[in-house]
Amino acid sequence: MHSPWAGGVILVAFAVLALILANIPQTAGVYHHLLESHLTVGFDHFRLSKPLEAWINDGLMVIFFFYVGLEIKREIIAGQLSGVRRAALPVAAAIGGMAVPALIYVLINRSGDFLSGWGIPMATDIAFAIGILSLLGNRVPVSLKVFLMALAVVDDLGGILVIAVFYSTDIQVGMLVAAAVVFVFMILLKRLNVYKMRYYLILSIVMWILFLYSGIHATIAGVLIALTIPSTPRFTKRYFSYKTRYYLRSFRRHDREGVQVLSNRKQLEDIEMVRLVATNAISPSQRLEYALHHVVSFFIMPVFALANAGVAISGFGDLRVLLEPLGMGIFFGLVVGKPLGVFLFSRLVVWLKWGELPQGATWAGVFGVSCLAGIGFTMSIFINNLAFADPATVSNGKIAILVASLAAVIVGFVFTRTMVKRKEKPED
């Protein structure tokens, strides 16, 4: 479960399961009926009643976007985006990887009914991409994996902005103002160094509900909430070191031969104090990101895939969508536009000497990673759901995303593996 490829494998398994359930006559009806079943939470004068699919896309995915927000903040504070020169390459690569696919899609669909889907090929699925790259093992430089991760984080930020600005409808100003007040109050809590998470939890639920009725997609609330979580620990490293030594000495001093810790109140108090000091030596933002990693990788994203990847495919004839403007825009945007955008913008930044090639990496390796960036899946399906209202168009978009993502996996994996072998042959 701690392997970097594990989340991607689980995601694939649940996507395949969704396709099986949606295409077997005995299970298809139950599958769709379950997703359309209404789940109601609340009481007489206030209750939320939505289909299960909406709870997943508007509820569970808020936690996913909250986790993404924590990742973005960490990378900006202390990661690959913490310095201008350090961030130049992944930021430029992400911008190219968003702009070129969107441009290709618009050129193909500029005169059609599917122009609103231009945001679909802009996304990169970080779990899939990192998972596939990790299958190549130690032969791929760690710096390339870090580059892909930083690129995907910036890509997620771009996707979030696109959703907030271009895929929000019927905006309710009153709800947005109320949400802004809650957000400012949460920022104030952070400024006052309030570390008790229960206060943030209560306000986060209120903020999510306000966004749910504001017209701006509720998942944006998750990112904004992440920005309010304190990112500095309550205790410094020096204080942590001093206090833990103090309580460990106390623990040894209160030791009684033949008496278990369970029966020794003083030792129990010492252990509890060590735990509290250790907890407060880690920032709430870091604790939450660590705690949510497996929840997101092994529950939220697989459940999203299970609910959204279930497209009924009657035969190879359904793949004709790839010959239509919608499918062509998505396919060529992800499989061609993504690699070109990421690679060309990366070369431009290095040529201008604004950034540097990842240590130990070659341009061939960067191009292989650029191909893997074309795996859209989660974010692409999410934007596809927002872009179109017609269920048939949504289904066609999903088919194109699945085929394009599979093609990006094959091209990226084969190209990277081949280039690695070529590089290793002289040494062998």
Image (spheres, rainbow, N blue to C red):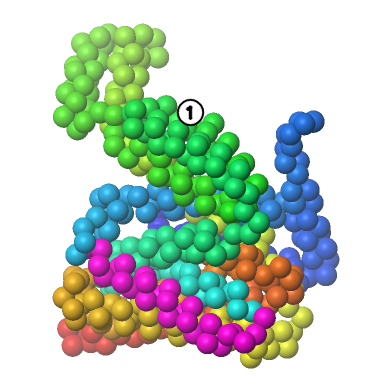
Tag 1 residue? 199
Q: Amino acid at mark 1?
A: Tyr
**Which residue is drawn at the image coordinates 56% and 45% (left, top)?**
176
Q: Is residue 170 above or below residue 285?
A: below
Looking at the rendering, which quadrant does residue 250 occupy? top left
Q: Residue at x 53, y 82 (%)?
A: 105
Furthest residue toward front: 173
Q: Give the SS element for disc 1.
A: helix
For image coordinates 31% across by 83% down, the residue present is: 344
Along the line of sight, the residue nearer the viewer: 31 or 261: 31
Image-quadrant location for residue 369: bottom left
Q: Is residue 127 left or right of 348 when viewed as pictured?
A: right
Residue 396 appears in the figure: yes
Residue 426 is inside the magenta segment = no
Q: Which residues are magenta?
A: 86-113
Say whether residue 279 is visible. no
Q: Residue at x 37, y 63 (%)?
A: 154
User: Which is the main secondary structure of the residues drawn in magenta?
Assistant: helix
Position of residue 18 measured from the top left corner of the image (x, y, whole percent): 67, 65
In this view, 85 is above or below 109: above
Q: Nearer the viewer, residue 383 or 181?
A: 181
Viewer-proximal residue, 221 or 419? 221
- Residue 294 vs residue 169, the one in the foreground: 169
| The magenta stretch spans residue 87 | yes
- Image coordinates for residue 420, horizontal then vertical, percent: 29, 81
